[in-house]
Every structure is written in structure tokens, then in C-alpha cells.
Amino acid sequence: MNRQGLKKAKRIVIKVGTSVLASKDLALDKAWIKAFAGQIAELLKQGREVVVVSSGAIAAGMHLLGIKKRPRNLPDQQACAAIGQGHLMNAYEEAFRKKGFHAAQILLTWEDVRDRRRYLNVENTLRTLLGKSVIPVINENDTVAVDELKFGDNDRLSALVANLVDADVLIMLTDVDGFRLGKEACVDSVDSIDSQIESAAGGTSKECSLGGMKSKLESCKIAMSSGVHCVIANGRRKDILSEILRGERVGTIFIPRKNKMQARKRWLAYNARTRGRIIVDGGAKEALVKKNGSLLACGIKKILGEFLYGDVVSVVGEDGVEFAKGLCNYGSADLEKIKGLSTKDAAKVIEKGFYQEVMHRDNLAVL
């Protein structure tokens, strides 16, 4: 899929930033939300399916409480989110209802996507809503999420949602026209996010926002590696969604790799909680990355952390960089006994519950 291919996109995830849907005084921009709902209504009438990942709850709560600067402590942030989330959903529901559709609120924390059963429950709910032409509006559950349960920002959440629903394209609406390299014009397309592109990205200085372009690029990486196209574009531009999905050259499009990850491997790669780390040698890394092989004991150099059979474990090269995750057939205690051994010798050490593969390739996701 290139820009012209976007015309055929069936399932679309749209991430809306606070800088787009809130005015300078942090009040929700009802006129923008009304126009946004109109654009989505047109997409639904074309037979497309749309999921919205929306920021704005904390900003809305700040406006209602008369707070000018984003609170630094967690309880105040949670209080603002609790007040603002209902206000945000009321605005969406009112706008969509006037176009003949309904919005459905879904609030998530990390635990909802880390746990496999909860992840599948969320997936089933979203697919059911899409089948009924309802627009799911997803946000992080800031009212209860503590630091260790936070996604960090809704950019990352939108990429995980795009994976979860097997989206064709992720559109990230912000207050800039696209991605720029320095002071140059916006880049038209990106097929690989390298160090030059990463160094050109920055965070955000806005009081009501998190993330910035750096966060968006990280989210594009997740989506691209899973076969999802991404577009970063200016949400304040009139009819921006229609322009993007007509294949017009607006914003910056990020082209994913050709081989799309299986749904289960996407969960392993980006959602599952890892319990430990396995450091492997160069030969093992090459077998996993280039030859679609399984991880064997002979390629393991070191075990970090404690984990049990069936836990998701990170696989790291000798350079310290994580490059894969997978379900481990051994706990860390048994793995310590057989690391570096040939399969034949490992079988002599593990008398019960022996597996030839430490991680089978079917249960392993290369990042």
C-alpha cells in the first residue's frame, strides 16, 4: 500500500492529540469535534471502520477547575481526568449522534493489554462495536493508572490499538503538517526510521500535552513493524481525513515492512509483560533474525532475572540491545543449568520436561 493504496483502507485508527481538540485555554473545541465527527461519518458511510484514540480528558478537567498548568503529582492528574473524561465523551457522543452514529467509551491501562485474556476481551469488544458501526473512543484510564500501569502517552496507545484491531492505517492528528527534517519542508514518506530521523524529532513543551514528535516516531515504529501504515498530519486542516484516504499528498506517510507479523506475535512483541532477559551470542541472533530459527540452549550466554516456564522473556544481543521476545520453555533456574550446552548435552541435564527449543520460533517475535 502506497498513498493511492490508502483509498482501499478498511479499518482505520485515528489518534487525536490534545493540541488539536482543545483551545488555548484548554476548553474542548466543540466546533472542531463537530467537524471531526462529520468526517468520520462520511468514512463510515463508505463502509470503512474507525477507532478513535483520544487525548483531552486531563486538559478538559484542568479547564473546568481553572487550572492553567498541568499538575505534576498523580492524584491531581487523576482528579482532572475523572472530571474531564465525562465531559470529553459527552462532546463526542453529542457530535456523533447528530450524524446518526454513537460513540462508545473504552478506558485502558497497561494491564488490559499485557494480560492475554484481557487483551482478547478488549479485541472482541472493539470488533463487536465496529460491526455495529459504533465509534470506539479509547483513552488511557488516567483516573486509576499509576506510573507502572501507564502507557506513557496516547501515541503509544494508538499504535498498540492499531495492532490489536489489525488496522490498515494509523492516522495521527497533531498541530503540525507532518514530520520535518530540521527546517526543511515536511517529508513526504518514510520507509525506515533511522538515527537521522530520530535525532530530528523532539518532545513537547505544551502544558497540556505529552509526547511530541519523538513519541509519534516510536509509535510509528511499532505500527510499521506490524504491517500498519502510519500518517502524521495536521488535524486542524479542513477535511484532512478525506484528503489522506483519497491518497492526496498531505502529511507524512510511514511505509511498513512487507511481512506483517501474526496477531499473536504482535502481542508478544509489544504488549506482553517480560519477566527476564536472555543474552545470546551472534550466531543465535543471526538464526533468529535472518533464518526464522528457534532459540537453542547452545546460543545462550547469560540469564538475567527470575522467570518461570511459560513466561515472556526478552532476548538481547551481546551489544545489550533487545531484538526479540518470546515464551520461554524453561524457568530461569533450569536455564542456568543448560545455557551454552548442545541439545544433546542439555537433554542429559534436564530429565523431566525437556524441550529441544528454549523458545520455539512459533512463540517468538523478532522486533
Image (cartoon, grey):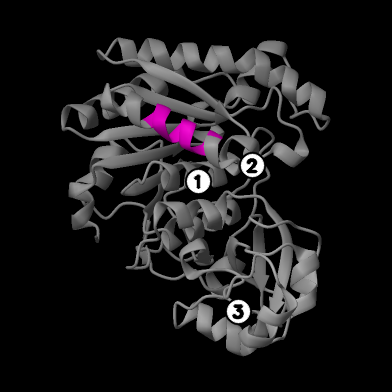
Task: Say whether disc 2 or disc 1 marks the residue closer to the N-terminus.
Answer: 2
Residue 121 lies within the magenta run: yes
Which residues, given as a range, are shown in magenta?
118-126
Determine if residue 31 is in view. Answer: no
Q: Position of residue 89 (x, y in %)?
A: 49, 16
* Residue bearing the label numbered 1: 160
Q: What amino acid is found at the position of numbered circle 3 in the picture?
A: Leu
Pointer 2 with pointer 1, Cβ within 8 A: yes
Taking the image as shown, residue 96 lies to the left or right of residue 361, namely: left
Q: Which residue is mark 2?
A: 151
Give the spatial CA distance, label 2 vs label 1. 10 Å
Q: Which mark is residue 113?
A: none
On the rendered image, what quadrant is the N terminus found in? bottom left
Residue appearing at x 50%, y 67% in the figure: 181
Kind of element beneath mark 1: helix
Dot 3 and dot 1 residues touching (CB under 8 Å): no
Give the percent coordinates (x, y) of residue 300.
70, 80
Q: Residue furthest right?
A: 73
Say whether disc 3 or disc 2 marks the residue closer to the N-terminus: 2
Residue 168 horizontal/vertical position (percent): 31, 49
Q: Which residue is mark 3?
A: 296
Q: Please, which residue is most extreme toward the left here?
A: 46
Question: Which secondary structure lies at badge 2?
Answer: loop
Question: Which residue is at a point 29% across and 10% down the rendered structure image?
Answer: 98
Q: Is 3 placed above or below 144 here? A: below
Give residue 107's position: percent from left, percent from top. 56, 26
Q: Residue 243: in sight, yes or no?
A: yes
